[in-house]
Amino acid sequence: MRKKLGVNIDHIATLREARKAGFPDPVEAAVFAELAGADGITVHLREDRRHIQDRDVYLLRSTVKTLINLEMALNPSILEIALKVLPDEVCIVPENREEVTTEGGLDVIASREKLREFVPALQAKNIIVSIFIDPDPRQIEAAVDCGAEFIEIHTGSYADAKGETAMHAEFEKVRNAAGFAQSIGLRVNAGHGLNYRNVAPVCGIPQIETLNIGHSIVSRAVYTGLERAVRDMIEAMR
């Protein structure tokens, strides 16, 4: 099965917000990503609005031709926006205002009560719900219990591992988690920290459907342009 690529355009907005200017525009960036072959566009509407803004999400809904995957925390005000925007998919993620980027998977077990409110509300609007979690069987079982259709496996520990032995150990956790999740009825995506050098092994995991990748693509685009950077990632995935 061909792996799909969801291009996360958050850091196009990071560049814009650094100067509080009108450019570069993540809405325009989404067009270039799709033209290059992206299967979807991912954005994280954070509580502190450090990059993606409400305006971006609404405009993307009316312009994106593939699908929109909205990452969001368990925050009622963000839920309200999601229910108005109606993205194709929502991925529920942890969020800490002090973090530079998402630091790990959501603790589904501890968040079960809130998830049992948020998940049905989104699904009632025909939004596919995923939960971003570490490759931990207990968290995967809890995701099923909360009614999610997908999980997105956090690949950050694999991407950050130092040395071949450590990387292999983290890869095996991801691979085993994907197999276990599928065996209990979940569909599987993956992402975080994936780049042009480490993406190929993850693409070999048969249960994974979509990889959501942003920072490495935007970083390469600084040198090559966004269309070329997306095409290069698709080639690396092959």
Image (cartoon, rainbow, N blue to C red):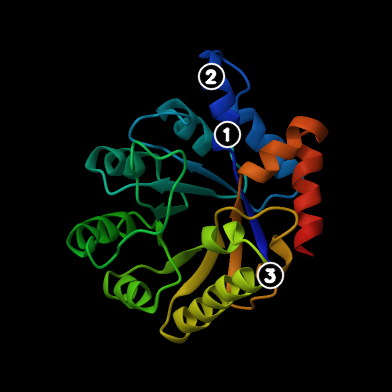
Q: Position of residue 182 (x, y in %)?
A: 48, 81
Instruction: Please name the residue that numbered disc 1 is placed on.
Output: 11
Q: Residues within 10 Å of mark 1 (few under 14, many from 20)?
A: many
Q: Amino acid at mark 2?
A: Ala
Res 140 → quadrant: bottom left
Position of 3 with respect to 158 (left or right) is: right
Instruction: Please name the residue that numbered disc 2 is placed on.
Output: 18
**How far is mark 1 from mark 3, CA to CA?**
29 Å
Would you place residue 103 above or below residue 106 in this image? above
Please, which residue is most extreme toward the bottom here?
183
Q: Amino acid at mark 1?
A: His
Q: Quadrant of the C terminus?
A: bottom right
Among numbered discs 2 and 1, the one appearing first in the sequence: 1
Instruction: Please name the residue that numbered disc 3 is placed on.
Output: 164
In front here: 213 or 219?
Answer: 219
SS for dot 2? helix
Marks 2 & 1, CB-CB < 8 Å contact: no
